[in-house]
Amino acid sequence: MSITNTYNSHILIIDDHPIYLDGLEMLLSMSLETTKIHKASNLEEVTKLLNSEVQIDLILLDLQLNQMNGFELCQLDIFNDQAVAILSASENMQDIQQAKNLGLLGYLNKGCENQTLIDDIRRLLNGECIFPNVQASVLLTPRQQDVLQLLAQGYPNKTICNQLKLSEATVKTHLRALFSILDVHTRTQCVSVAREKNLI
């Protein structure tokens, strides 16, 4: 999801630690004056808000939640087409890679300086992807590899859906993840970079 500016934007913070949730809400409300901050601490509150008429521009999602893992939560149907960034105290390489694989917008460290966090959130609202500089080899899931192989053969999404027996939404999710992992913006670039990295 692309966002052009921070004016009148809506941010949803999902975290089940009340002190951190309230503190971040206060910080962002003071620093992003034209941005409306919403917060939720459980799935019920998240579902109610995302099903409302409020148009959320960015979701900041805690990775470790009591009800379920943040990665599991952001794959629910209610999160379709939402711009999501993980907010975590950990910079575990596997977690960062999984966030990229899921096509999320970013991975922010809870422990960073306030101004750094605010600046990063502004960049996210402008559509940038933000991930820690972690050196890692390109890792694709088996299903992403299947989608990539068919993409390289020039098949459209509908054919890929039929070949792999997947819904169109699922195929689009895999494509977003591939684009993020390979740092590309078009199908042609995706195939080209994948060939350079010997992925196909």
Image (tube, rainbow, N blue to C red):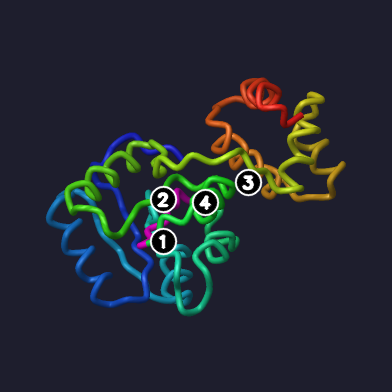
Disc 3 to disc 4, C-alpha distance: 12 Å
Q: Residue type at mark 1: give it.
A: Leu
Q: Is mark 2 on a helix, strand or loop?
A: strand
- Examine the image and state in which quarter residue 178 appears: top right
Q: Which of marks 1 and 2 is nearer the N terminus?
A: 1
Query: Where residue 16 sits in the image (x, y, percent)?
Result: 37, 76
Q: Going from the N terminus, do you reach mark 3 or mark 4 first?
A: 4
> Would you call the spot at circle 1 few (<14 residues within 10 Å), some (14-19), or many (20 or more)?
many
The residue at which mark 4 appears reads as: 99
Magenta stretch: give its range: 82-89
Spatial distance from mark 2 to mark 3, Cα to Cα? 18 Å
Disc 1 versus disc 2: nearer the observer: 2
Quick check: 39 above or below 27?
below
Q: Which of marks 1 and 3 is nearer the N terminus?
A: 1
Q: How far apart are marks 1 and 3 (CA)?
A: 18 Å
Observer-nearest residue: 165 or 16?
A: 16
Please state which amino acid type lies under the numbered disc 3: Thr
